[in-house]
Amino acid sequence: MTEITSRGDAWNAVRRQVRLVVLIHSAEKAGLAPLSVLRLHAFAFLSNVLAPVWEMPVLEGKVLKRKGGPFYPALQRDLDRLVGLGVVIISNLGHVLDEQKRWRLEGSYRLHRLFADHILERVSQFEEERRFSAFLDELAFAVSALSDDDLDKASTQDAIYSDPIVDFGNVLDFAEWQHKNAAATAAARLGRSVPGGVRPNPGEEIHLYLRHLKARIHGGR
Amino acid sequence: MDGDDQEMASLGAWEGDNLQSTALANAGIGADAGLPPETRFLSGVAKLVRRRKATQGADSDPIRPAIFLLASTSRVHNLGGVAKRAPMIDNGLEVLSGRLWSVNEGVVSGHYVELEELDDDGLFKLVADELKLGNVPAIIFDPRTIPVSVRYYQDGLRSPDTVELLSVTGANVNLDRIFKVIGQVHRKCLITPEAQVRAGKLWKDASKWWASEDAEDLVQLHLRVGLTTAFPTCTVRHEQTDVPGRLDLEIEECDPLDRSRVTRFAILELKVLRSFGSTGKGYPSQYVLDWVDSGVRQAATYRDERGAREAALCCFDMRRECTGEECFNHVRDLAKELVVVLRVWFIFASSAQYRDFTTEHR
């Protein structure tokens, strides 16, 4: 039983790492890379909250609400592992003291094409992974409408992350035990607000979400 | 979650926000998701150039070409210096000319470097030889010509003879022009199994006239690509309805400066006519007649709902016998009354069937 569980854990870890490679690849296609640690985590957060818009399963349905923005410890471990494997390259390396007064590695991440392209090629042979990749591509294109400063402030205006009902230091649960995803609801509501009775596709809804997020960052409501 | 539930669901921190204002200002962005990258790229740049030309102050832009490359930013960095990032280039506020742009396929954002004063040959050499990007899709926007020209190099600037001129003056789309494009798509991509790409075959088993269950989706995708390429400043929406087998295409164009002002040129109701389904199940002739009848009514209803200028029922006939426009005999009066134009394109199950047909009808 233990062996089966550890095999399952290992498989899940590989799958998470592969999806992280796809995420960085999408960011590169959109001109967002190299990605700093927190921008990468912000992008991952948006991919989790907006996955239902594309009818994709949510990979992480909860996150600790921190003042500095979303941060997934498991994702960071995967990222460090990918750096160790040479699949991801880190530049501008440094250390920062986070809000819990712990030192954290800081840097900018991009793919090492020599290794990553093989992974991406294999991944593209699976229908579900192709759908996931298409979703991340579109999300990255939408996110690319945000300036670097905007992206750093994204969590402060996100429909879920900036909800005052949940205080900093508590867990934001949108798809783990609870199924109240304000971001997906807002994207759908934005879609229904398009004039002329048009029913926008998921791509359009994702862009609308990011455009509204940007408007809020700049003081719009 | 259905519509009512969504109305009740919380918007979190966005409760009370004016979402309609965002939707009005940004409708259409991302509507081309799912199209091939090259198609999105050419349409995105054409819309961008049109928008920039209509923007106040664009008259004083440098009268020098701009080059757009569908390539990652890191490749443009090779030019020396740091490429400047321009998020939201699609708002038309950024000067385009005199710059080398690397953009993503959505043409939402991009990076640019200023181009040196070079002659045309120098520009091509810069991209092909210096940047080694001669094989990536490229577009040259040339404001030196009257009217301005936009040249699309699908195979990159290393193949300067493979070029297509894109219209950015705003499309004047009507059904005649649309049918011409559909005719080209049909001849190039649909007419026989050999014309169809391997990944997108319309036949499950052509020797038995068993049509693929994805036939509608594939026809729709080919038409979206063909129509977007032909009318790059337009958005070709595919309606996702809850009615099985119902497929619509809507060809619209927004005002270059105000996305909420939309001209809807045409509604196309698409129907695939089958003798057999993908499992060999036969389709009775009465079913096909009813299918065509419903298509006429849907096209008219949909046009009226959307305020589109024209409507057409476009049938793709995959049945055993090519009977031309006979499939419309029972709806001609209805179509005339509802002002719906009827067209049919036959999809042959083999090249031999196509040859026999063309020989008989020579």
Image (cartoon, coloured by chain):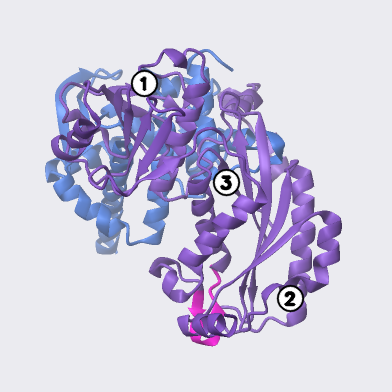
Tell me what hue chain B is rendered in: purple
- Counting residues from the start of the chain, the first of labels 3 and 2 encountered is 3
Residue B219, x across and y down, in percent: 54, 63
**Going 46% across and 35% down the picture, which residue do you hit?**
B46
Q: Nearer the viewer, residue A48 or B331?
A: B331
Between residue B316 and residue B14, name the one nearer to us: B316
Query: Is residue B91 something one can see in this rendering?
Result: no
User: Looking at the rendered structure, which numbered label has been put on residue A152?
Assistant: 1
The residue segment tinted magenta is B203-214
Q: CA distance from mark 3 to mark 2?
A: 29 Å
| Residue type beneath disc 1 | Asp
> Circle 3 is placed at which residue position?
B236
Q: Quadrant of residue B82?
A: top left
Specify few, some or many for label 1: CA neighbours under 10 Å numbering under 14, 14-19, or 20 or more: some
Determine the CA span between mark 3 and mark 1: 34 Å
Q: Is residue B227 visible?
A: yes
Instruction: Determine which residue is flagged by label 2.
Output: B326
Q: Callout 3: residue from which chain?
A: B
Is-magenta flag for residue A75? no
| For residue B269, above or below residue A49 | below
Give the chain letter for blue: A
